[in-house]
Amino acid sequence: MASIIKVDTIQDQDGNNIINENANTITIGKSGDSVNVTPGAIKDSSGNVIISKSGTAVTIGASGDTVSVASGAEFVGGGIQWQSDIKTSAFTAVAGEGYWINTTSAAITMTLPASASVGDTIEFSDYARTWGDNAVTINTNSLNFQGATSPSPVYDTNGQSVRIVYSGATQGWIPTSDDDVTYETPQVSATVDFLIIAGGGSGGNAESAGGGGAGGYRNSYSTEPSGGGGSSESSVDLFGSSVYTITVGAGGAAPGSDGSDSSITGTGVSLTSIGGGTGGADGGSGGGENNSPPAGSGTANQGFGGGTGETPQNTAGGGGGAGEVGDTDGAGHGGDGLSSSITGSAVTRAGGGGGCRDNESRPGGTGGGGNGRRKDLPSTPATSGTNNTGSGGGGGSSGQGDAGGNGGSGVVIMRIPTADYTGTTTGSPTVSIDGTDTVLVYNSSGTYTA
């Protein structure tokens, strides 16, 4: 039978503790000692190596063994080794290390190791709670991060602490803790075309008021005239599992109100069309000139400016349209809108409102622009722009109690490859199929989840 010696402390011949137990903590040696095992291994009673050393590497257990730590025990000095130098500029991380990253002065890029093994772990934390102002960007160094090498992960939440663990080549580095374990490398799920038209401006508020300007017009589906309005833009990428907010701007309410902006916003996308100006004001398309205020100018690549009218018959200027300046077709005429076939058939939208005139109604521009008031005929008041075209309202006459026409509300249209369409929407868009694409027409605000 083996002998058992029960002691709390084993000392050397000089009285120094070499093995000591205190409150369940066992210490071998003392600070500054070298603990040697000769001939380089500790074996169990069957001759199996349980602790060995080769070079500078110390191995606990043999291949196939399970090494256990008693419940409540912990390794002191093991695990992640936190670095004392605070990182304030770009650096390359090392597996097994932790970093305090201070972005007070500037954003920082942390490059991951060029190679990694399963279980490699790196931690990093916001030292000064400034990541929201200056983010930390991860250079993956060609290894996958959540299954992809791009886009580069970005951490931009104040006070965030992150732990990433390497899982193998397929998924690569995976955050096991980053507050909400955000998906940092979202992948493109669809490339879509769009038409975004803001709300049109109302007719002006004056004795002889100018027509309202059309809402800003942004389009990617086909090439439109360049310059003042409707320039063709590039299609946009939507990212999987991301929610995109669609805002449809209201038309300006008479008297004298600009239209509201329309937009698509979400991960990787920020597109806004500017509301049309009321008679005499700037906007996506400018309002026409009243008796005294100057004509409004349009927003570059979204809409044209308003017309200036003319003195005979007190003709106020027509509002600018997406396709041309107000008054292009005659004094007081609203500027014409633009035609798009994004839904599968050609539709003209975003016409400017007509200006007020003494003895003749001035027409709104094609695409839904409201007509201006004929001052000498009570039965011909100004009319409103057509809703969901972003057209401007016709100019009225405050002297005849005619406040002018309201601007038409805007519209947002998205054309998505049917193979990529998720069907997850809010706001009840009209959904149709054109060829290989699904078309969503938002006449009111809502969302689309990619």
Image (spheres, grey):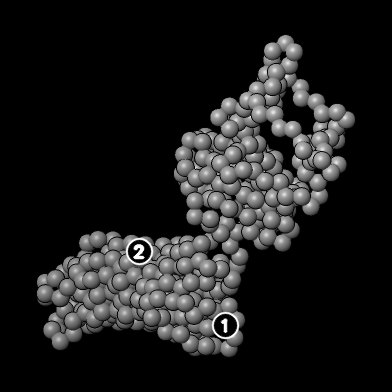
Residue at the image position 47 percent from the left and 67 percent from the top? 243
Q: Quadrant of residue 16?
A: top right
- The image position of residue 187, as x and y in percent, is 61, 65
Residue at image mark 1? 418
Residue at the image position 54 percent from the left and 79 percent from the top? 421
Q: Quadrant of the N terminus?
A: top right
Residue at image mark 2? 283
Q: Is residue 50 above or below residue 26?
A: below
Q: Is residue 20 visible?
A: no
Q: Is residue 121 visible?
A: yes
Residue 353's disc is: none
- The image position of residue 170, as x and y in percent, is 72, 61
Q: Is residue 167 above or below residue 393?
A: above
Earlier-in-chain disc, 1 versus 2: 2
Element at label 1: helix
Q: Judge left or right: residue 67 versus residue 222.
A: right
Q: Quadrant of residue 327?
A: bottom left
Q: Is residue 32 above or below residue 110?
A: above
| Residue at mark 1 to residue at mark 2: CA–CA distance | 35 Å
Residue at the image position 62 percent from the left and 33 percent from the top? 76
Q: Residue furthest front?
A: 1
Type of amino acid at the residue the image marks with label 2 = Gly
Q: Judge left or right: residue 149 versus residue 344.
A: right
Total count of labels:
2
